[in-house]
Amino acid sequence: MNSQLELSAHPEEDSASKPVAADEQAPTEIPSIQVATPAEPPPAPAYADAEDEDDEEDDDEIDSAESGLDDAVLGAEAALAAAEAEDAAEARGEDVEDVPIVLEPEPEPTPDERALHAPHVRPTGEPAEIDPDELDPDALKVVLRLHQHGHQAYMVGGCVRDLLLGRKPKDFDIATSATPNEVRGIFRNCRLIGRRFRLAHVYFKGGKIIEVSTFRANPTELEHAAHGGEDEGDGEDLLITHDNVFGTAQQDARRRDFTINGLFYDVAEGRVIDYVRGRRDLDERFIRTIGDPEVRMREDPVRILRAVRFAAKLELDIESRTYAAMEGAVEDLPRCAPARLLEETFRLIRGGVSAPALKLLDALDALKILLPPVNAYLKQHGKEGEKTFYAFAESLDRRVSAGEALDDAILLAMLLIPISRSTGPEESQEGRPSVSQVVEDLLAGFVQSARLPRRIAERCRMLLLAQRTLSGERRRRSAAFKRHPLFSEALTVFEMTVEATGENREQLEAWKAGEVPPPRAAAAEGEESDAGGQRKRRRRRRRRRPSANGSSGESAGSSSESGDA
């Protein structure tokens, strides 16, 4: 029977790879997992006729649950396609401008633009604080053109921070006094995104995007100033639910989360503009909030995850008052949009620093909110569980740091494998093999409330199931398993598992050599004990080639019925 996993959820946009606004809330309806059963069984794959008679004898030993999973795996392509179709259907409602398939080419620079450049020497005669050769040429083009049209424009945030630390920025963001519509009027290869606060994306060759934002002000500061600087009480709710207020460059710097992210770089002057004393904290290697840490963490508790990511990625220390505020704001994390929490959690894993970041989140007691099964596993298994879990995380970090591009399903599966291994295999009510129930619930919850794409959830689940076959814990038809659409990715996960545990190296080498390792002795003994116990095995009927008169099928059915009788 061909099984297909369907995780049903309220239609929302797919934002596992897009930032989500702080005030967006997800529905609370709990998804259901349904198994769709086709009216007729699918035809046998063409390669089945080429199997040896020995393979058919082995098939006779497969019980009904194993048979069901074999057919489910053969239908994996259909299941993944269905999940992707549902994700695509939900994404159609995204509130962004339509983008043509082929953007208009960037116009040739005017004579005045050719004269614009980033100086290597400041007007004072000193060298530029950041070498212009280290700046992205397309970002430089955007800044200089905004200057030409009379607007303020600076490189901001992470790119300035990373350059001052001697690191190569992942991307370059720009803040300007121009409104989003003005930016779009200047750059024809531009589109606006965002629901509450519009951002401009300027496109260049190779798919590069330069994000341009208009100076904003912190609404909390504006409201505080409107009340004459008086506090309304300690019980005031500071959670930011709207921040679509334009402001000045200084207000834009002060609204940012940490001092190291509040630095601007003036390309024309060749100097760093520091309204928040971020240079001092960079030199002292501290992460410090801009303003009162208690207030800033209560405004947006997701800043806890951002501070953890910067501390792990940049190897910085968190300033003591900021850390204390993070501990107090952990209880406010459930108030944030689940999609934002999930995206920030994925950023921790994608950065190649998941092990130190998750250790810090565990110390803050934030894992119970972000990854409840991981928190329960660490609490239940103590020191030995921590050693095992972080061995998997470190194995993942080594792959990411080496530059290997890993799908989000692989990243998530690597963190859930220790949990899946500790609980053992399970079966759903329909009789098909399943990962542990806590993992199933976590994936379903991510799909429903945090907008994890169904494609990623289904792929993660399949990768976890495949590990039992790769390790030899369960028997499979080798021909079907090697044709599984996720076989290559499952083998990558298995290889990282072997690196983390030191187990099953022989099985790994056999799979990589194109061979099929024999099942583990424990698995074989388990199957024999099941056969001798209360579990009854089902013998499959052998396919017979149809004869010329076409009566072979009926005779095969008759002989089988008589044999069963």
Image (cartoon, rainbow, N blue to C red):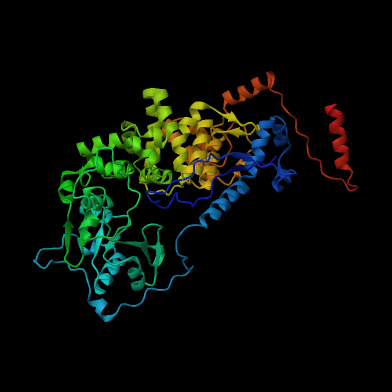
Residue at figure coordinates x 39%, y 25% from the top left: 379
Task: Give the position of the C terminus as an image quadrant.
Answer: top right
Residue at figure coordinates x 30%, y 59% from the top left: 172
Q: Is 481 on the left-hand or right-hand side of 334?
A: right
Residue nearer the viewer, 247 or 78 = 247
Task: Place residue 133 in its image quadrant.
Answer: bottom left
Task: Place residue 500 in its image quadrant.
Answer: top left
Q: Please identify the residue farthest to the top as the structure is shown.
A: 533
Residue nearer the viewer, 432 or 62 = 432
Q: Position of residue 82 (x, y in %)?
A: 60, 49
**Whether residue 537 can be seen here:** yes
**Whether residue 312 can be seen here:** no
Q: Is residue 284 above or below residue 167?
A: above
Q: Is residue 153 above or below residue 549?
A: below
Q: Position of residue 80 (x, y in %)?
A: 58, 48
Q: Please identify the residue farthest to the right as the structure is shown.
A: 549
Residue nearer the viewer, 316 or 86 = 86
Residue nearer the viewer, 188 or 360 = 188
Q: Please identify the residue farthest to the left as the structure is shown.
A: 124
Q: Is residue 155 above or below residue 304?
A: below
Task: Give the position of the N terminus as an image quadrant.
Answer: top right
Q: Position of residue 92 (x, y in %)?
A: 52, 58
Q: Position of residue 75 (x, y in %)?
A: 64, 45
Q: Is 442 on the left-hand or right-hand side of 53?
A: left
Q: How many marks?
A: 0
